[in-house]
Image (tube, coloured by chain):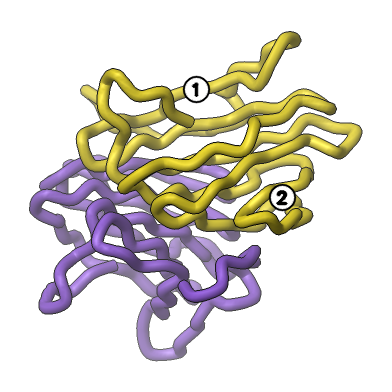
Chain colours: A purple, B yellow
């Protein structure tokens, strides 16, 4: 980020009709800060990150978060951590859009998929 | 965190009458996830973290954030990144409580002050 500034996540989210939309807000070798945007019914399949912790914070809407075989209902304001190697996923089970702040530490390498 | 679970930040914040309250939500060598809680008038003096990026997200209230000599008004929902080495601080200039999610990556060492 060349010019640090206040970010209003809802204003910069990427919404897609075909699948979850992703936006990168800040990236360094230490951390990737982004948004995952789910239209109703959209999901992010269970996955894990080796050597990285992931923080989810729900900014808007509600959904089911998967973590270590648990299904956790989450709504705006709720926070969840998927520590190193713990499988996690998200499904928008609500009738409205679900917007989630995602933080991965450290950031994935340039050849990894992420989010 | 032994048993990952959904966290409702507002329910676990620490409020102090004498100074900013701090709460740790999750810590690993890779990331420190916490809360800074400011009663009206409380502040966190300008400081910097060498080798760490810090993410602020305002969960409740409003205030002035200091970043590289700028004063940035922020309110609930707004996000700001203080990259490695960039001085930053916070002041609750509002009439209500200010609750801020803070993420430091990587986490400070055990002998550092942090937050």
Q: Quadrant of the N terminus of chain B?
A: top left
The spot of residue B111 in percent (x, y) is 29, 19
Give the chain of mark 2.
B
Measured as percent of width and height from the top left, residue B76 is found at 71, 50
Residue named by callout 2? B76
A115 and A91: which is toward the camera: A115
Residue holding disc 1: B23
For residue A22, above or below residue B93: below
The answer to which quarter of the image holds residue A11 is bottom right
Q: Does A103 sit above or below residue B102?
A: below
Q: Residue furthest right?
A: B95
Nearer to the camera, B101 or A81 = B101
| Residue at horizontal 78 percent and vertical 30 percent from the top | B97
Q: Is residue B38 above or below residue A92?
A: above
| Disc 2 element | loop
Residue occupying image coordinates x 75% and y 37%: B91
Q: CA distance from mark 2 to mark 1?
A: 19 Å
Residue B28 percent location from the top left of the image = 23, 33
Which residue is more in the foreground, A114 or A76?
Answer: A114
Name the image quarter holding residue A79.
Answer: top left
**SS label for mark 1:** strand
**Location of residue A13 in the rendering, given as x and y in whole percent from the top left corner:** 54, 76
The residue at the point 76 percent across, 25 percent down is: B42
Question: Which mark is first along the chain, 1 or 2?
Answer: 1
Chain for numbered disc 1:
B
């Amino acid at each position: 980020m060349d010019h640090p500034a206040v970010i209003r996540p809802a204003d910069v989210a990427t919404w897609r009709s075909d699948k979850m939309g992703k936006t990168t807000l800040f990236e360094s070798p230490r951390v990737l800060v982004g948004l995952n945007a789910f239209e109703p019914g959209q999901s992010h399949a269970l996955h894990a990150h080796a050597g990285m912790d992931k923080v989810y914070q729900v900014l808007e809407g509600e959904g089911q978060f998967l973590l270590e075989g648990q299904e956790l209902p989450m709504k705006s304001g709720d926070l969840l951590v998927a520590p190193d190697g713990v499988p996690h996923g998200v499904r928008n089970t609500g009738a409205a859009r679900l917007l989630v702040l995602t933080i991965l530490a450290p950031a994935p390498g340039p050849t990894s998929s992420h989010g």
